Amino acid sequence: MTASSPMGGSPILLAFSGGLDTSFCVAWLKETLHRPVITVTVDTGGDVDTAALEQRALALGAERHITVDAKHAFFDTVLKFLVFGNVRKGQLYPLCVGAERGLQARMVAEQAVALGSDTVAHGSTAAGNDQVRFEVALRTLRPGLEVLAPVRDHDWQRAAQVAWLEERGLPVPPGGGAYSINRGLWGTTIGGKETLDSLASIPESAWVVTAGAFVQPQEPARHTLGFTQGVPTSLDGETMDAVALIEKLEALAGPYGIGRGIHLGETILGSKGRVAFEAPAAETILVAHRELEKLTLTGTQLKVKEPLGLIYGDLVHEGQHLEPAARDIEALLSSSQARVTGEVKLLFRPGCLFVEGVSSPHSLLAATKGKYGESAGEWSAADALGLARMKALAGMLHTRAGG
């Protein structure tokens, strides 16, 4: 049933983060299109003040604000598989922000259908990745939806947006400073003038989660991270759900500067882009998970998983999470985790995450009767000599043929 409004017409559902772009969209859509605007915040983690976002949306002219708690859905449908696949862009960046856009688009589309609306909107610009992620997901989910992107399609620059809001006496959101900060459950990204080229880091004062990590160094600390079939399930012996564990790990590892970096890579548009990031929990989980897999998976399993993890990461990064191939990859990744259960002992030091040890009831290291570099177990000295000779055969023939 279509939501009723004194303005008439079905409402426009706007994906609302509370930043400048989406704040501007609330007022601009209402004034320009003369239709009610309902803001939807899909909370996928990252210290979101949902009450403040609702107040801001209503003050900007939204008819209604909807908050959807999607943190657990985000882990179950996306983050879990990023862990299973040990996914990093450029062998560095753990997809801190952006991985959630497909889920956010789906939930905004669901709200639109529930309210009888045929129009959704987002605040993405023409220069970033999010415009593609939102558009691909929304059009895949609901091909009949009209998708509006006022900032992109009408080339509204940030200074002009601020002036437009101020002229009407509407609130301008905080954070309009030198750095653009996006926080999510899996980490934080920071963009500023330094990330527009490749020459320097952002200043120490611009970091958020890891602020002060090297100004007031923490004393070393040891922690134990437990996994059950690839899913992080305990921290220092305390069982907890994945979302709570990620949030606690960020609080523990952030003050050490763990997971801080700057990613340089390809944007969805095809150009190069650079962004600073802080991912204390993601870094800790991915490093620990990788080591546990080395103990419990065969070499062939590891080789098969690695390229699929890269492909899956690209699909998520580019807003193609709804592609059927992603379900196929998820099925293989899930199957591979059947024995990835155990504990990883970690040492936190400023700027350093060190794996001290790893244990599992499915340890392939413990399963052998031999001791690497010291004594044979299931094989004899003659077996080892024969293997060495056979391994050398291809090289011997190549040398002989070249003579």
Image: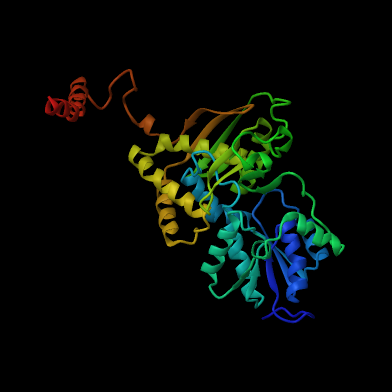
Q: Identify the residue at the far top of this view.
A: 374
Q: Nearer the viewer, residue 118 or 274?
A: 274
The image shows residue 224 at horizontal and vertical percentages of 57, 33
Q: Residue at x 57, y 64 (%)?
A: 135
Q: How is the image coloured?
A: rainbow
Q: Quadrant of residue 246?
A: top right
Quadrant showing the N terminus: bottom right
Number of marks in picture: 0
Residue 137 in the image, given as x and y percentages of width and height: 54, 63
Q: Position of residue 235 (x, y in %)?
A: 60, 38
Does residue 18 appear in this view?
no
In depth, the one of 349 and 395 nearer the eye is 395
Is residue 373 left or right of 169 when viewed as pictured? left
Q: Outermost residue toward the right? A: 169
Screen quadrant of the C terminus: top left
**Which percent across, then down, holds residue 346?**
56, 30
Which residue is located at x 65 percent, y 44 percent?
Answer: 188
Of 101 and 240, the residue lying toward us: 101
Which residue is at a point 69% across and 32% down the rendered structure image? 255
Q: Is residue 177 above or below residue 328?
A: above
Q: Is residue 318 above or below residue 259?
A: below
Residue 181 seen in render: yes
Quadrant in the rendering for residue 112: bottom right
Quadrant hosting residue 251: top right
